[in-house]
Image (tube, rainbow, N blue to C red):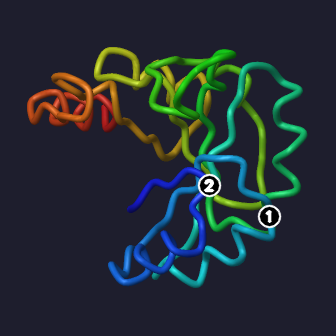
Amino acid sequence: MIVTVNADDALLHEIGALRPDWIQAHGAESALRLAEMRGFAQRGVIKALGVARAEDFASVEGFEAAADMLLFDAKPPAGAELPGGNALAFDWGLMAGRRFGRPWMLSGGLNPGNVQEAITASGADLVDVSSGVEARPGLKHPALVAHFLAAARA
């Protein structure tokens, strides 16, 4: 999987040469742009959507036809440099009972200590982690990854 933020055409062509299974679109991409991105991924495109409150789900419908999967992440705080990977969680209970036209996964502030709580609260079948298993920014810690996987499966 390759994670992108508002990838331009030149970057998509470079990504396409790598033949990734999935491309995760984590920026302000439109549904039309997701459809264009699909041609560069072997399996499909995942659209990341920021959530802070129930009203944030209003945008989901516009992406269900264009994305192959949805990823719900904590909405970054005002002034944040990154659209995701900020180690922030949101109220996972907001996901409970929601149904979507595409498979979805939960992200945002997950780590080995809270992933099972997040799964229980949200009803998620799939989870995504990044900073929650890092020894330092950008460096995954193998033991934390193993603990996360064990906790997610519990």
Q: Is residue 53 left or right of residue 105?
A: right
- Give coordinates of residue 136: x percent, y percent: 20, 22
* Mark 2 and mark 1 residues within 8 Å of each other at the beta carbon: no
Label 2 Cα neighbours within 10 Å, binned few <14 / some 14-19 / many ≥20? some
Residue to which mark 1 is pinned: 31
Q: Is residue 118 left or right of residue 77?
A: left
Secondary structure state at the residue bearing disc 2: loop
Q: Nearer the viewer, residue 77 or 92?
A: 77
Q: Amino acid at mark 1?
A: Ala
User: If the image is split into quadrants, where does the N terminus sit?
Assistant: bottom left
Residue to which mark 2 is pinned: 6
The residue that appears at 82% across and 31% down in the rendered structure is 56
Q: Amino acid at mark 2?
A: Asn
The residue that appears at 54% across and 26% down in the rendered structure is 81
Q: Is residue 11 above or below residue 110?
A: below
- Give coordinates of residue 74: x percent, y percent: 61, 26
Q: Is residue 82 above or below residue 121?
A: below
- Give coordinates of residue 11: x percent, y percent: 48, 69
Q: Nearer the N terminus, badge 2 or badge 1?
A: 2
- Give coordinates of residue 12: x percent, y percent: 51, 73
Q: Is residue 36 left or right of residue 112?
A: right
